Image (cartoon, grey):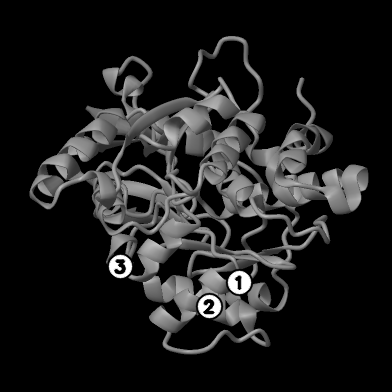
Amino acid sequence: MNFVLGTRRIPEKAKRVVVLVQNQIGEARFGAELFRDVLKLSVFLKPPPSSAFDHSGICRRQQFLIRSLGGGIDHSRNMQQDLRSVEVDAESVIRSITPALDPTRHKGQAGKIAVIGGCREYTGAPYFAAISALKIGADLSHVFCTKDAAPVIKSYSPELIVHPVLEESYSVREEDKKTISRKVLAEVDKWMERFDCLVIGPGLGRDPFLLDCVSEIMRHARQTNVPIVIDGDGLFLVTNNIDLVSGYGLAVLTPNVNEYKRLVEKVLSSEVNDVDATQQVLSLAKKIGGVTILKKGKSDLISDGDTVKSVSIYGSPRRCGGQGDILSGSCKNPAVLGCVAGSAMMRKAASLAFCHKKRSTVTGDIIECLGESLEDICPAT
């Protein structure tokens, strides 16, 4: 099979693709591995229209990226200029990457995501992440959680597809752990190819056996080149096992202040530097290797190790729990532009909710404003 890049044809067997890295590099370059840089920031690669490859999950994710990352951000500035002025026109990014509504498309083509999280103690976070993806236009949203959490999460909304497959240590005998772990992995793995993105960590908890199972799920996601967004207890897992994401260009980490502090101490062996926050988040992403980091704060900083972008528009003084879960669900396209869009939409929704509810604003109010915030910026036609 030959792949088409513009008017070029490249033999598949050569396993060399032309990767166009937008925003900072602005030059076409050859990559020895098919997917190594697929989200930094775009792979303009498609098979001939008649090819059966059109229907594979890999091609679907590539086409989603092409559709999403086609928009005009000036990449002519050099790195020093970027570090001096990192604020990005987030509304323009949202307009450029939001897929148009098309009556010829079928269910699933606007995105299928899966949240890996939810345990006895925490059932809200995975719901917030999963429902937020639907509220900004994804077609299908799955939750893989523990058996205890499943009935609760199902009761929140009939819109979510809930899989009660994860297990915690208290319900598994020591001699059964290997068998159960393989069973959990098999249950998730049979769905893996269908997903455009995994969101790992909301409501996951810190049970050792559960974290071991999720580690294996992450390794399989890497093997099949599925993008992953890591939040909440997923960041606790990654901070203690950096190799899970090191060098994986399809991973996005979304730490809050405390999670970021732990990452900086672990990876850079230093304290958080608020004076030179831009350079530090750049160094952190570069040291981990290939991942994109969205550092949440008064201004959200986003870096893939090559550049830094900032989103400071909108926002709310009300800091209710769960806003990070909304953001992780909104980042269903885990690249710099996707993070910019997810950040801006969450911040705008929080601002709208605060206008209505003031001090009584809770996460559910923000979720209800996601659709309005997207419609204000990018009206449906």
Query: Is residue 320 positioned above or below 113 on the image?
Result: below
Identify which amino acid the numbered label 1 is placed on: Val
Q: Is residue 36 left or right of residue 197?
A: left
Residue at image x 48%, y 79%? 264
Q: Exactly how many numbered labels are in the figure?
A: 3
Q: Do the CB atoms of the residues marked 2 and 1 lie less than 8 Å apart?
A: yes
Q: Note whether residue 141 is visible.
A: no
Query: Is residue 225 positioned above or below 81 on the image?
Result: above
Q: Residues within 10 Å of mark 1 (few under 14, many from 20)?
A: few
Query: Is residue 352 positioned above or below 261 on the image?
Result: above
Sequence-wise, which precedes: disc 3 or disc 1? 3
Residue bearing mark 1: 257
Q: Quadrant of residue 273?
A: bottom right
Determine the CA span between mark 2 and mark 3. Answer: 16 Å
Residue extending farthest left: 175
Give residue 181's position: percent from left, percent from top: 18, 44
Q: Do the CB atoms of the residues marked 3 and 1 lie less than 8 Å apart?
A: no
Determine the CA span between mark 3 and mark 1. Answer: 19 Å
Could you say which is closer to the camera, residue 277 or residue 91? 277
Give residue 351's position: percent from left, percent from top: 84, 50
Q: Residues within 10 Å of mark 3 (few under 14, many from 20)?
A: few
Secondary structure at badge 3 equals loop
Identify which amino acid the numbered label 2 is placed on: Lys
Secondary structure at badge 1 equals helix
Residue bearing mark 3: 241
Q: Is residue 161 left or right of residue 223?
A: right
Residue at image x 39%, y 38%? 145
Residue at image x 51%, y 26%? 154
Residue bearing mark 2: 261
| Image quadrant containing the N terminus | top left
Residue at image x 59%, y 33%? 131
Q: Note whether residue 359 is visible.
A: yes
